[in-house]
Structure formats: structure tokens, C-alpha cells
Amino acid sequence: MWHIREHEVSGIHRLYINALKSIYMAIKGFVAENLTQKASALTYSTVLSIVPLLAVLLGIAKGFGIQDIFYKALLDYFPSHQEQLTRSFGFVDNYLDQVRSGIFLGFGLLLLLYTVFNLLSTIESAFNDIWETPKGRPLKAKITSYFTMLFLLPVIITVSSGLTLTMSTIKNSFIKDYIIIGPISELVLHLIPFVLIVFTFVGMFMAMPNVKVRFLPALLSGILAGIAFQTFQVMYINGMMWISKYNSIYGSFAAFPLLLLWIQLTWIIILFCAKLCYAIQNVDKFYYEKETTLVSRRYSDFLTILVAGHIIQRFVDISTQTPHTAESIANTCKIPIRLTMIIIRELIELGIIIEVNYPEDLKTGYYYPALDPDKISIGYIVQLLDAKGSENFKVDRQRYATEWQLTLATRSGLKETSADTLLKDLPLGN
């Protein structure tokens, strides 16, 4: 399955293979990257930040004069948490009163914004790890993106709530007596909250990682996340009804462990579906995926020279205006995207290439040579690869001088024969 290229199959067979690859890679990545641990960390951050986050959203809603509608919308969309939300609203009102009064006005506001900013930054970091993007947004881009999200969220929730109310009014006033349209309108009313949840997930999958995410992979993953979230909501409500029997023993603490479980499983659903989104978008680059982690030393050097050569020649070629991206290199060289990213990161660490982000497209990295192309030869790159890492161990080199010199001698022949071969002069399959 992993050795089949996209052009070798067609139709239903290709769709079936791609679906299997995506699901397998999502499950494998979820386990290998220990995303349950990241979900636990995000649960902790969410619990600490929930009141400041609600305070910011409520403050924005008050600025638009829609705070009452926003209250009701949250209660409608999270029916299993009405008691907790009502209490949280009380905490939020007190919190905002404290922030607005006294000598701590500026400090309290800064602390409020920092807490929310830190939560969103933690979420972005988790998504960047899933998408194997080591470079996060610049600080200015983070501030712009995060506060855009915070401004839009209460407006979207309120508009959706208003849409639901409008549809309900129309149904009860005009079409309730129609045999066919009545049930359809009832179905639409029940679907509106689900559609909002799905597109909330879609927006999260597209906006949070510092990489371009296509709409279709985000939509498919968002639908799965929405179904899983709604299913778990039903289970949670039933669990709350069951645990209410123990209120006389545990009091209000009875619901707290279940709330933590709800937050934890919500993050597990989000992170798994984010990994699935990554797998769907890159499914056509997962061929030879199992061999990616088993690539030989010499073949790794060969691919590194290949990637660096394409980046340098694209830079030198004045007829080509657009520099290479990770995706274009993977497509040109027919290398799996994961291996391409590993090689690119290594070339950046060695100081051979640099990554540039343009203001009009901050999520896409473009790669340029970091040195004069006339100085980048095969021998130079092999020498850097060979010397990469630490050699500062307490091994007696005087005692093992013969072995050390023999080891160095095995490299000298390669360096001499390839020292003058510049990467810009390689044929690269032409």
C-alpha cells in the first residue's frame, strides 16, 4: 500500500487506499507523538484559563451590546454544563469588576489578556507539533490572529443563536402545519448547533497551525470531530444524571471529575482529528512512509544534496520568480513530506539555507540559500553533515589515535573528489 503512487491507481481504489493511509497515519501519529499527554496539558491550561477566557469573550460581547444573547447562546450550545456556566458567569462578573476598579486596573487587564494569550499559544504549539512545523507565528502575527479569533467568536455564536431563533419562529408561525416542510424545518433546527460546532472545529484546524491547511481536509476532520463531540455530549449528560445520585455524599464536587474528563476527552477528539486533517492533506506524500525512519546514512546524504541543490538552483535561475516551499520540493524530488521537512530542518541548522515568510502569506515558508551559491559544494555539505553534533566525550584520542585517523581517512577521498562540484551545477535529473 505504501509503495503505490497516486497515478498508478484511479477512482474508488485510490480513494480506498488514501482513506486507509490517512486513518492509519492518524492513529500511528496520535500514539507515537503521545497526544494524550498533550491533551492532559491542554486540559490543565483550559481549567486555569476558563474564567479569563470567558471574561474576554463577555467583555467583547458587552462591547457589541449582545451579552445577554451570548449568555443564552452558550447555555443552549452546552446544555450539559448549564450549572457550571452559570457559576462561571458569576465569577466572570466579579473578575471584570475587580479588573475595572482600583489601582490594579492596568495590571489586572494585562494579566487577563496574558492568560488568554498563553492558552491560545499553547494550543497553537500543539497544532504546530502535529503538523511538524517547528516555527511558530511571530509575536505580531500571534497578537493579530488571536484577537481576531476572540472578536469573531462571540459574534459568530450570537449570530448562530439568532439564526436558530429566527428559524424556530418561522417554523412555528408559517410552516408548522405543512406535512413535508414541518419535519424538514425541525431537522434543520436540530442541525444548526451541530453545523456551528463542525465549523468551529474546521476554523480551529485551519487557523491554529502555522501552516496552510486546505478546506476539504479540515471539513472532513471537522465533521468527524463534530460527530464525536456530540456523541460524547450525550454520554456526558447521561453521566451527569447518574452521578447526581452521589450529590448527597460528595456535594458539588461530584461533577468536577466528570467536567475534567469532558475537557480531557474534548481535547483528545480535537488533537486526533487535527492529526487526521494532517494525514488527509498529505496522504499523497505518504508513499514509502515506513522507510522514512529507516533511510540509510548515504541515502540521507544523497537526499540532502538533492534538496539543497533544488533550492539553490531555483534561487540562481533568474527565470523562476517563486522560491521553493517544502511541498514543492517534496513534489519535485518525489520525497515523502515528512522526510523533506526533516532534511530542510537539518539544512537550516547547518546554516546552508534559510526560511523566509512573506507578510501576505505568513503560513508558508520559502527557502533560500544562506551562503553564496559559489561556495556550496557537495564536499562542503558532506563535511558539515559529518561533523554535525558533539564530539566532546571523554575518549582518550591519544590512545585511539590510529583508529581516529583511519576513520577520518575514509572521508577524505569523498571530500577530495567532490570538493569542487557545486550544487548549482548539478544536472538534477535534467
Image (spheres, rainbow, N blue to C red):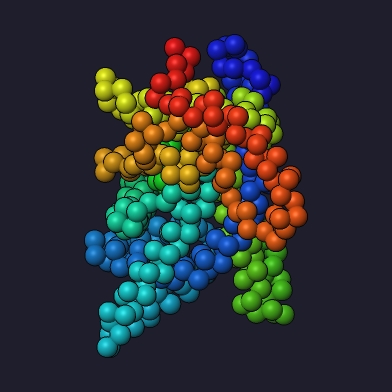
Single out the residue that lies furthest toward the left: 64
Left or right: 244 in relation to 118: right
Rendered residue at 33%/58% (across/down): 139
Image height check: is 409 above or below 56? above
Report the front residue among 202 and 210.
Answer: 210
Could you tell me residue 266's position as x and y percent? 57, 54
Q: In which quarter of the image is residue 260?
A: bottom right
Whether residue 200 is visible here, answered yes or no, is: no
Q: Quadrant of residue 64?
A: bottom left
Report the front residue among 201 and 361.
Answer: 361
Image height check: is 291 above or below 206? above
Left or right: 270 in relation to 394: left
Could you tell me residue 361's position as x and y percent? 31, 39
Image height check: is 339 above or below 173? above
Whether residue 14 is visible here, answered yes or no, is: yes
Left or right: 45 in relation to 367: right
Could you tell me residue 208's position as x and y percent? 43, 49
Left or right: 323 in relation to 39: left
Task: Give the position of the C terminus as an image quadrant.
Answer: top left
Rendered residue at 35%/25% (across/down): 314
Rendered residue at 70%/39% (across/down): 406
Rendered residue at 63%/58% (across/down): 392
Report the front residue among 170 and 52.
Answer: 52
Image height check: is 111 above or below 145? below
Task: Give the position of the N terminus as an image quadrant.
Answer: top right
Report the front residue among 187 and 324.
Answer: 324
